[in-house]
Amino acid sequence: GLFCRAVLKAQLVSPEFTGVYVALAAVVNSKIPEVGELLAARGVAQFRKAYRRNDKMLCIGSARLLAHLVNQGVVHEIVALQVLTLLLEKPTDDSVEVAIMFVKECGSALEETSPKGLHAIFERLRGILQEGDIDKRVQYMIEGLFVVRRNNFKDFPALPEELDLVEDEDKITHEISLDETLDIHPELDVFHFDDQYDENEAAYAEIRDEILGADGDDESGSGSDEHSGVSGSDGDDESDGAKKAEQPRAGQQDIEDMTEASLVGFRRTVYLTIMSSLSYEEGSHKLAKLMDGHRGKEKELGAMLLECCSQEKSYLKYYGLLGQRFCFMHRVYVEAFEEHFATYYATIHRYDTRKIRNFAKFFSTLLASDAMPMSVLELISLTEDETTSSSRIFLKVLFQDLAEIMGVTKLNERFHDPDLKPYLTGLFPMENPQNTRFAINYWTSIGLGALTEDMREYLKTAPKAPLVVKTSPSPKASSSSSALSSSSSSLSSDSSVLSPSDTEPARTEEEIERASPQPHRSTSDRAPPPRQSPPRIRGLPDERPPPRRASPGRGRGRGLVVPAWVKEQEEEIRLRKRSP
């Protein structure tokens, strides 16, 4: 099951190597027929699923696999004729295109095994061409297929010499129909406990040696032993001399190179390899071969990747994919990049904005693909005191790129993961309302306010600190309040002494103001002198204008400051009017 799944996956990724994968499956089928039958059944099931879903690319890949299985003799040719009949029953542009590709791949084999069936298929194609219901491009493809048939499929051989690995008498052909119910055995894709593991492993070892040709290796090994035995004396002398040379001399001192010439050469080689690679697959393959001889320098490799990435004018995803490939390769590289993250975040203020952006996008590529765990974010404390302008730029680019790759919704779900939350307390502080407000403002300013829902809820329910205001009474206010209290007390005592018999006629406000003692006032608080009215002559009408009423917006309503003694006198007049 695992072998069939690997072959199907590799064939879909690299359709041009389908012949190679099927040749390998044919060799295995000659020794273990169950594997070939399972591969054919899964190929037919995959084709039917792709046809029902109208998935053109998957349909082309599955049809190519079935065609090569027919060429290798693993599957009977009836499957090929059924596939072509199904594709041409209700012709469309895509179905006819898939059928043309299928005929090119296995037409040579069908010409030998079932010429009448192939002739019927070409007659159907001729009828489709004459009807003219399909696109012009597909019509030209049909005409090109007729040319290929006229040349006896010379450019599309059924079985190239390099892939003809199984003898005709060893081939095992499985008869599978396109309409029958197939069991693809999905339970074989996982390992199960085997009670007879030793016996089955021994039987598998015999089949493996038979397929891989272990006998030939033994013969070559024995031949090499005989050859080495002829010149055994010379070889022994040379080996003895080499052993003596390798033995350290007594009292010899080890020399340590403090110039780090080997490290400089290693960094130069890594730099040239990175710059000369066309793709990250090529670069990772070359660097992996280089690291086989430089164990313990994984951290230097990560540092070189980051340095080369920072030198670019704009971020290239090539470097992030290189780092991702090495993190998936071994845990040692993950630990190395975690150390680099801590180092660069602590010293991020030393770099300019261009390098900060490249660093942030490099690490966001690793975090988004889980090549580096998000637990490294525990180093970040998003407060006003713990961050600088450079670190805020770094975090802004980092999380904006993460949101662009993963999506804000998925990123929010990831941050709410219970296993990850203990490492994110610094990013979302909730121990101090001031730090919480700063974090909310920061996340909102970079366009990720959707991540701050928990902090906003915390601010709503957080206890508020009591506000203590200390005020010192001014001498002027204290004197005015004491004068007001004394005047009110004296006024109350006077009103209690008065009786109805001692009452006097009511006096006007001007008489009361002139009779009452005036408190000491400054020049600014002194009221203007009263206006003197002209004397009135008896017998003449009073020509003085009537007193004007205070209109809204005049007098005190316009913001004039009323002295305290005026308020006291008004209060005294009001109380005298109320007394009997």
Image (cartoon, rainbow, N blue to C red):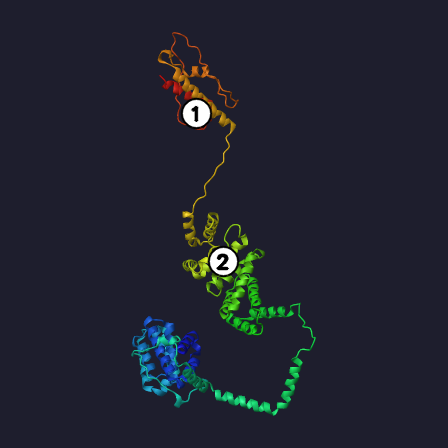
Provide the residue designation for mark 1: 555
Looking at this rendering, what residue extends furthest in the top direction? 539
For residue 243, say whether it is visible: yes
**What amino acid is found at the position of numbered circle 1 in the picture?**
Gly
Quarter of the image with the C terminus is: top left
Q: Position of residue 550 (x, y in %)?
A: 40, 23
Provide the residue designation for mark 2: 378
**Horizontal arrangement in the rendering, residue 51 relative to residue 224 (left or right):** left
Residue 48 placement: quadrant: bottom left
For residue 107, say whether it is visible: no
Residue 192 placement: quadrant: bottom left
Q: Secondary structure at mark 1?
A: helix
- Picture residue at 37% right of the left edge, 77% below the top: 188
Tell me the distance, in whole angstroms, between the alpha carbons under discs 1 and 2: 66 Å
The crowd level at tag 1 (other Cα within 10 Å; few <14, some 14-19, many 20+) is: few
Q: Position of residue 62 (x, y in %)?
A: 37, 76
Q: Earlier in the sequence, mark 1 or mark 2?
A: 2
